[in-house]
Amino acid sequence: MPARVSHTYEYPRPALTVDCVVFGLDEDDLKVLLIQRGVEPFAGRWALPGGFVRMEESLDDAARRELEEEAGIRPGHLEQLYTFGTPERDPRGRVVTVAYFALVKLSAHTLRAATDAREAAWFSVWDTPKLAFDHVDILATALQRLKGKVRYQPIGFELLPPKFTLTQLQRLYEVVLERELDKRNFRKKILAMDLLEELDEVEQDVSHRAARLYRFDHKKYRQLEKAGFNFEL
Amino acid sequence: MPARVSHTYEYPRPALTVDCVVFGLDEDDLKVLLIQRGVEPFAGRWALPGGFVRMEESLDDAARRELEEEAGIRPGHLEQLYTFGTPERDPRGRVVTVAYFALVKLSAHTLRAATDAREAAWFSVWDTPKLAFDHVDILATALQRLKGKVRYQPIGFELLPPKFTLTQLQRLYEVVLERELDKRNFRKKILAMDLLEELDEVEQDVSHRAARLYRFDHKKYRQLEKAGFNFEL
DNA sequence: CGGCATAGTGTCCGGAGCACACGCGAGTCA
DNA sequence: TGACTCGCGTGTGCTCCGGACACTATGCCG
């Protein structure tokens, strides 16, 4: 451990943090990852995972590091969301936070409790406890982004297990977009894009006719993308 | 002037700046506002207007203030774009910048030189001089955002004078989207939205048949927006 | 008064979206 | 073991929207 030194600047500087909104899909429920705060301010309250940006790491790296540290998660998709910087958003003083937006396959991650015993848990996005700081605003912004984004970029697949049925996929869209979709048209459209690989497998352990499993073809998507193809709905 | 004091923190902090990409439309050319740097690093190079965020102002306020100070501009539209925070982006040390994206009616603004004699000027976005820092990346990001955004939000109007012809509007879209549009379809679509107020005036001083002038109806737009209306193309 | 430059306008066609209904396969339970 | 139930998986036809497309109108100028 290096000796603790202090750092002096000619002008005052805001502190800089990152905060992550991590979404996961649990059956028909959209979940967000929250961490229970152990210290003041807002001790005991739930908050988005996040922390201070180190001097030698990029913002993206900071977001990834915090997720790894606080919940043992490596998201399948991570992108910068928005930067929140109202002077009063943190009672300790001026703290500007760069918010990130992440998607994980819930099935693939067992949550690891944070090292410092703070608790991490998934909550339905429609029913979260009261959040610390301005994290409700951040969450709302992330939800909006998700809604906007699933329609024209195939990021929804990051929320599903590698093999999924078309019905699962449709449900995902219905949950995120908060409206029902026509089954026939949904399938026609998504299959017409030729981005799904039809597997020779079907669901297991269901008490009705088993649905065929599909896999998202990332390689094909990148090819089509280069050729000027536009994913939509 | 307060005595210059220094500021000490337990952990090092990045410096925080804002940088603004300001677009303006000059006939058929899309322009961006640049400032010539007076000091190192990159003295003499052109750069985006911007500067340090003060402790008591929000990020948006900082952006507005810098635009006012450096060019005497109050943009018709201003929104946060993206935050750039690679550790090496500024040779002086760690500087994280929140980039903004602004639109102004070029006709309404005569550029005011910055108080400290740094020069401000408009450049065609397709032909800028070499920029300081990572400002090319910021500009590219802003252009992308503009392209994406004009199609589903009526922000294009912020680039035109209050009264404009349909041809001007179409040209604007053609320039931004970098492709030609069909005149009849464009008019049909835009008029069908019922967002333009047809004025009893026509262009002046043209050596051919004068075109009718229109005005964008902000009030009607807000109403339709609440009713779930979607502006598109 | 003729030429020219831009304004302004309507139709047709194909593809996409949408509503609708039925057969299938597998598990369940009596 | 056979009948039932439940969700999977498909074809069709109608409607409507979006894109392609070419000519007439108007005003200025020389």
Image: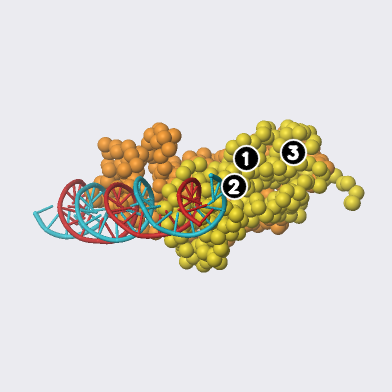
Chain colours: A yellow, B orange, C cyan, D red
Q: Residues within 10 Å of mark 1 (few under 14, many from 20)?
A: some
Same chain check for tags 1 and 2: yes
Q: Between disc 3 and disc 1, whose residue precedes? A: 3
The answer to which of marks 3 and 2 sits earlier in the sequence is: 2
SS for dot 1: strand
Is A187 placed above or below A118 here? below
Few, some or many C-alpha atoms within 10 Å of disc 3 (few <14, some 14-19, many ≥20)?
Answer: many
* Residue B199 relative to residue A4: left or right: left
The spot of residue B107 in percent (x, y) is 42, 44
Pointers 3 and 2 in contact (CB under 8 A)? no
Q: Is residue A99 visible?
A: no
Q: Nearer the viewer, residue B125 or B129?
A: B125
Question: Residue drawn 36% across and 48% down?
Answer: B169
What number is the disc on residue A27? 2
Which residue: 73% across, 34% down? A45
Q: Secondary structure at mark 2?
A: loop
Foreground disc of the pair 1, 2:
2
**Residue nearer the viewer, B108 or A231:** A231
Identify the residue position indicated by label 1 in the image: A124
Say which chain tag 1 marks: A
In percent of the image, x 52 and y 48: which residue is there? A171
Q: CA distance from mark 3 to mark 1?
A: 15 Å
Amino acid of disc 1:
Ser
Q: CA distance from mark 1 to mark 2?
A: 11 Å
Q: Indicate which disc residue A36 carries.
A: 3
The amino acid pointed to by label 2 is Glu
Viewer-proximal residue, B161 or B11? B11
Specify the amino acid type for callout 3.
Gln
Q: Residues within 10 Å of mark 2 (few under 14, many from 20)?
A: few
Image side of residue A8 versus residue D1, left or right: right
